[in-house]
Image (tube, coloured by chain):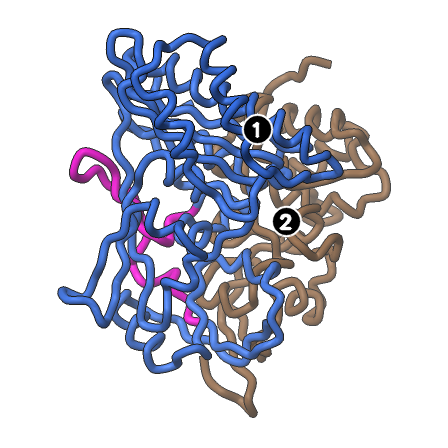
Amino acid sequence: MKDVKGSKILKFRLNGKEKEFIIDPDQKLIDLLRDEGYTGTKRGCMEGRCGACTVVVDGKAVYSCLLYAFQVYGRDVWTIEGVGSFDSPHPIQKALVDAGAVQCGYCTPGIVMSARAMLEQNPSPQEGEIVKMMDGNLCRCTGYEKIFKALLLVSGQKGNG
Amino acid sequence: MRFKDFIIVKSAEEAVSVSMELGKEGFIMAGGTSTTYIADNSEKIAIDITRAGLSGIEKKDGGFRIGATTKIDEIARFNMDGWVLSEPAWRLATQQIRNISTIGGNISRVFWWSDFPVVLLALDAKIEIKDSCASGGKTEMNALDFFFTQPVKILKPGKIITSIWVPAVGGDCGFGYAKKTKTSPGFTICTTASMITLKEGEFEEVKVAIGGVFPFPRRLIELEKVLKGKKCNRNEVEGVVKNVVSTLKCAGREGMSSEYSAHLLSVTITDSIFMAVERAGDGKNERC
């Protein structure tokens, strides 16, 4: 990183591409991402509880509201913008829509990112593991059943109902 | 607290050197999740130690040496005979937090909700500190001494935690962990950890640590003394625990009264002791 007028230049891979940003040392990752136009990552609680801000860093789901931007120097960061597209949705996105697991949609980007990280680590999680690995994503709308059903479907398993 | 600059160090030696140079302006940081809870208006320079080669778990000296920047997720997933830290790790917060937080960070600045200080106290763990002023460049503290006061008072500039050693638990030893929360990933209301050794149906050795209901985690030495040599009988243990807890001043959390917290503490202590009893001598101390 280099000093530019008191700020720092930060380099890391974002959604598969090498990027360079000018940052303030005190800047949180979520603020950097949203300021740079990656607004799919949502501001929720801003204290590491709700999961709306979840992104994936080096394959692990993390709260971008807790991470400082400088912490991802040289790392591999994925946001919801890097997952599927409107014309070609990711299987997780398709499963959530097909299962009726999207209502207001505010928690959904965070849920997709957590689920993606989970399934990349273990493509066939059991229901208990899904519940455990998704415990950092809150949803006020759906009651979670359809979300779990969608994730079980995408992992090739059937749920209990 | 506000960061005005940051330095990413590549080794423990560099971390210590930079910390000495920056003095109170430096802030050793791994995951950094606790910075949200630091009520401090000062400006600091972050010393990021996540790339200093301080992570990883290895079997060593009859136990396990855990690098200070080992993520809680890695601790949860580790699996080897005698390893008992998976259960406390899986119960810590959410997956996103477990992916960022480190064991060193969880113990270097202790909050009333901190889980691993309770675990390490019960296990009689040892904390290795790289110390530029110590002979040999490092010191080792047992958990009882380390958590006697807020660790940040020990970890002055030029000192960083490099690793934590915990014993492998097996044979006639058992470890139990009980944590009560309002929601599954919530902050603790009450945390207890117990390590016991049984001999012919009696408690040969007992270590019980508690947290959550006090501002600071602690060992219950007074309980340990009473239980040592006693028969391993649940009814009797419940009575002893209740008597000891009645002498303590428990904080009410999450809208609960202090009286209820005390009751919850009694129940949780007994539960953790008997989890340890069940696991002693029957090979149940592997990963939960």
The span shown in magenta is: B47-71
Horizontal relation, residue B25 to residue B63: left or right: right
Which dot, 2 or 1, sits closer to the camera? 1
| Residue corresponding to mark 1 | B246
Specify the amino acid type for callout 1.
Answer: Ser
Q: State whether residue A112 is above or below residue B262.
A: below
Q: CA distance from mark 2 to mark 1?
A: 55 Å
Q: Decide whether residue B63 is among the magenta residues.
A: yes
Specify the amino acid type for callout 2.
Answer: Val
Choose top left, top right, bottom left or bottom right for residue B281: top left
Q: State whether residue A33 is above or below residue B182.
A: below
- Residue B20 image point, x, y percent: 32, 78
Choose top left, top right, bottom left or bottom right for residue A21: bottom right
- Residue A33 image point, x, y percent: 65, 65
- Residue A138 image point, x, y percent: 72, 40
Neighbour tally class for label 1: few under 14, some 14-19, many 20 plus, Cα within 10 Å: few
Numbered disc 1: what chain? Answer: B
Q: Nearer the viewer, residue B87 or A130?
A: B87
Q: Is residue B283 visible?
A: no
* Outermost residue to the left: B136
Q: The chain shown in brown is which?
A: A
| Residue corresponding to mark 2 | A83
Q: Colour of chain B?
A: blue
